[in-house]
Amino acid sequence: MSVTNGFAVVARNVGKTYGEGKSAVTALGNVSLEIRKGEFFTLLGPSGCGKTSLLRCIAGFETPTSGAILLSGRDITYDPPNSRPINTVFQSYALFPHLTVAQNVGFGLKMQGKPKAEIASATARVLALVKLEAFADRLPQQMSGGQQQRVALARALAPAPEVLLLDEPLSALDLKLRKEMQGELKRLQIETGITFIFVTHDQEEALTMSDRIGIMSAGDLLQVGPPREIYNNPVNRFVADFIGETNFLTAEVRNNVVRIGAGHEFAVPLNGRQGTITLAIRPEQVSLGPAGTGLPAKVVEATYLGTDTHYTVALQDDSRLTARIQSNTTASLEVGDQVGLMIDPNAIRVLEA
Amino acid sequence: MKRNDKASRNARNGWLLSTPALLVLFVAATGPLVIVVLYSFLEKGDYSGVRWIFSGEAWFRILFERDIFDGTVSLADANLSIIWRSIKLSFMTTVITFVLGLPTAWFIATRSPASRAFWLFLITIPFWTNLLIRTFAIMEVLRNQGLLNTFLIHYGLIDTPLQILYTDTAVLIGMAYVYLPLMVLPLFAAIDRFDFKLIEAGYDLYASRMNILRHVILPIIKPGIVAGCILTFIPSLGAYVTPRILGGGKNMMIGNFIELQFGQGQNWPLGAALSTVLLVIVLGSLVLYTRISSRRAG
């Protein structure tokens, strides 16, 4: 049994460069990635990080400059898109404007040469799955954005691909619809058991839906792991900053003890690091007490956000931290108040400086 | 009641305001048409013009001819073959311009916006050149000692010059050349609006290149195809200069035949009847095209 058998898609040292010579642009450095069968995998990163290039290499629209792409252990690097059992949900949906919803959904099966009866039953089944049975005879342009999104999804699911690629499919929808579709996508993924590879730049979207997330930046894959692991243990400053809000503090390590600001000491697991380091602290893990407890600090900004209030506090050396405090737990603080800052040492992550 | 008054006054004012447009429409379009149809039912004058006596002779003569000596009636083969040739050549012109125009329009539409303007400029240059000059240029290319034959003989492809000039082929080449821009421009406009993502979507959904052309590209740019075909077929039907010069007077099309009736033939009613026939063919093909274009692709 091959080692790749448990994986739906494997990218092996995939590199992609556009252009040649001086004007060459590297979209993918050297990406290796294993995506498990039946998982909801998200490629997350800012625009231009290479996530779409990687997706297009998997779909077959681009050929990697180096490396290989495997589908269920089979090398598909040079297969054209129409011979890969992989379907794509495009960011712009790319629905065929001259075909009805049912014809759009049945397109893939028709091109595969499936008999009419099979196309009809598969189309009806998939339309039911996305709750669009009533719209089978509409044209795409007669439907709302959210409905078009479902048609695009149904069209890509109808041929029962091994892998479904989703290229920022929710970015054109308004917030409420996007939330709704997030749940819908997750439900569809579980119901169909198809491997979903989802591309987004929205970290919240990635955290809510994914089984695992791959964080990309500048053509490289920085970290792969379940959402919780990525949130709690970011490998570097970029990941920590990109996922959720993070306070970064520069600290000194002396005699295996971390010192912040004017001499306050923390016992933080250091793995033998010395000298100047960066600490990453989530705002919800910072608490504020009365002056005299913990680190002395001064409130410089208070933003009321309903359930939570964000306080920006300045330490004595003027480094700043944001604390997210539940609004009803403490008496509200005013700008200028002296407070005592407390951080749970277990919640502090040490990053390379 | 009051509201009704106002509505009717508005309607009256509306008619009043559109009077100039209606007048132009009548004087320039409907009026002449009525005269043409009317003339086709009159007797021909001695030299030219008409005599105001009702006669079906012109219509009869389109389809039939009477023997000069014994007065026997037979089908007017000459007239019918001219009408048939016009339809045939126009249809072939449309097909040729489509086959040449589609890749051309595709090429232009897929260039960068800057060079696109340049290519479009090249396509439209012939528009600004006199039709006669362009047709004589084609004649220079096609004649026995012309560019094409010299070239073919020089490279040993043929021994004796090909007689292309004064044949239907020459007319066809000339018309295809003249009407090509009219095909390319609407096709370009349609392809320019085409969302190329749809090709990727089709390719992703197991379509072969041929199937993408058949099931995605052609149905979506169909309005452009229909417009191009109408713009090519209809002027081809009534073409006059091209068949006159390249067909050499032998290979007449309806346009030349009509001219003949108003000129040398001095038979205005027949010319008017032929013009009406041309108009009917044009309207018929327009109806056909709209039928095709409104039919939903399945």
Image (tube, coloured by chain):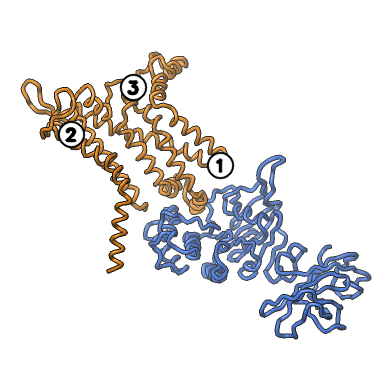
**Chain under disc 3:** B
Sequence-earlier tag: 2 or 3: 2
Query: Mark 1 = which residue?
Result: B113
Q: Residue at x 51, y 38 (%)?
A: B108
Let me know if residue B182 appears in the view. Answer: yes
The answer to whether dots 2 and 1 both sit on one chain is yes
Q: Is residue B41 left or right of residue B126?
A: left
| Display colour for chain B | orange
Q: Nearer the viewer, residue A233 or A302?
A: A302
Sequence-earlier tag: 3 or 1: 1
Question: Please, what is the three-letter code of the amino acid marked with disc 3?
Answer: Ile
Establish if B75 lies above or below B209.
above
Let me know if residue A82 appears in the view. Answer: no
Chain in blue (letter):
A
SS assignment at label 2: helix
**Chain under disc 2:** B
Give the quarter of the figure containing the N terminus of chain B: bottom left
SS assignment at label 1: helix
Query: Mark 2 = which residue?
Result: B39
**Chain under disc 1:** B
Residue contact between numbered discs 3 and 1, judged by CB atoms under 8 Å: no
**Residue B103 placement (x, y as % from top left):** 46, 38
Establish if A97 lies above or below A36.
above
